[in-house]
Image (cartoon, rainbow, N blue to C red):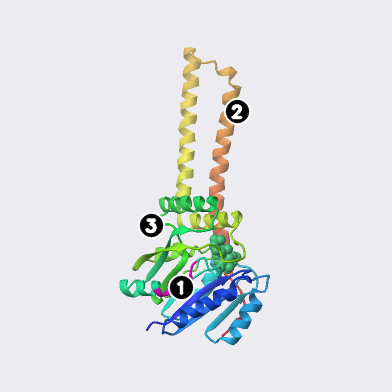
Amino acid sequence: MKSLSVIVPCYNEEAVIEITYSRLKTVLNGLNRETSIIFIDDGSRDKTLEILTKIANNDKYVRLLSFSRNFGHQAAVTAGIHNCDTDLAVIIDADLQDPPELISDILTCQENEQANVVYCVRKSRIGESKFKLWTAKKFYRLLNRLSEIDFPVDTGDFRLIDSRIIQEFKRFKERGKYIRGIISWVGFKQVPFYYEREARFAGETKYPLKRMLSFASTALFYFSKKPLLMAVGLGFTAVVIGLLMALWYIAGKIFGFTNAESGWTSIMIGMIFFGGVQLLTIGVLGQYIGILFDEVKERPEYIIETAIN
Ligand code: UDP
Ligand code: MG
């Protein structure tokens, strides 16, 4: 039987973490194989670390990594994968939105299909705002159109990966990690598993709008160069419009069908339009330069303060 670890990123999850642990434990005990749980405490400011430390001290199959500060969800999952040496790993949220009871079905699916990745697709999402559902849906489809590879839509990081994927993942040096994108990018045999996403068990989401936007921009800019191409297209369109307008007004002056002098409005429109085009394209360029700046510094993605087991 293949060994399994479950990777659980936790940030301020004191309200659920004990229940998450006990539900996970029940599931894992029923699997008849070597299992462990890797909790990553992402610099929580509540009692999460205290509770997890107690759990890890009482259960040698629980490993705990705690960060020196909050590094973000993707960094926490990354640390989990980096420290994982089992045949299989399941990535799951701490808030029980992804039911741990599904793990055994996911394992069966992996075995039947001999898959390297089983990614869980949300058939429905209970307890999310209409706004989040709509933006998430549109975003995944937009990303698919802009990037060179096809990402499965409506999936999160809840998935099972095997040692082949874990090994390849460890070779990724980029600091801005969009994990579900990287796993799709790696390839091998990837199969879907459909499930109903539950509402958060307790506590509140750690992905307010600002974080959602920054997450989306990492995904977009790390996986697509099309925004640069679009900037070129926009610049090109502006040049064509400018040329046509120039021709129109010159001809108008010669043949007397426009009165170019009284053109205050057209000048203002032109200025604002071209100013906008320039700022926008510089902005797009700036995003990529910002990413380059972050990447060339080669800072560590996360810092582990303590590790148990
Ligand atoms: N999380 C984390 N670090 C963060 C934010 C979130 O480790 O900076 C964890 C969080 O504890 C949870 C998972 O990532 O286990 C998903 O976060 P959340 O449930 O808040 O996101 P949502 O499901 O609302 O998108
Ligand atoms: Mg959640």
Describe the element under mark 1 as helix, strand or loop: helix
Q: How many marks?
A: 3
**For the residue with label 1, is its CB less than 8 Å from the closest atom of ligand 2?**
no
> If the picture is divided into quarters, which one holds ligand 2?
bottom right
- Where residue 43 appears, as percent x and y from the top left, is 64, 71
Magenta stretch holds residue 100: yes
Mark 1–mark 2 distance (CA, rounded to whole Å): 62 Å
In the picture as drawn, the residue positioned furthest to the top comes out as: 256
| Most frequent secondary structure within the magenta stretch | helix
- Where residue 254 appears, as percent x and y from the top left, is 48, 14
Amino acid residing under circle 1: Glu
Of residues 87 and 226, the one nearer the viewer is: 87
Which mark is drawn over residue 150?
3
Amino acid residing under circle 3: Asp
- Where residue 7 appears, as percent x and y from the top left, is 51, 74
How many residues crowd mark 1 within 10 Å: few (<14), some (14–19), many (20+)?
A: some
Q: Can I make out residue 201 in this image?
A: yes
Amino acid residing under circle 2: Met
Q: Which residue is mark 2?
A: 268
Q: Which residues are magenta?
A: 98-104
Q: Which residue is mark 1?
A: 101
Mark 3–mark 2 distance (CA, rounded to whole Å): 43 Å
Describe the element under mark 2 as helix, strand or loop: helix
Asked if residue 259 is positioned above or below residue 185 in the image, the reply reads: above
- Where residue 59 appears, as percent x and y from the top left, is 56, 86
**For the residue with label 2, is its CB less than 8 Å from the closest atom of ligand 1?**
no
Magenta stretch holds residue 41: no
Q: Can I make out residue 296 in this image?
A: no
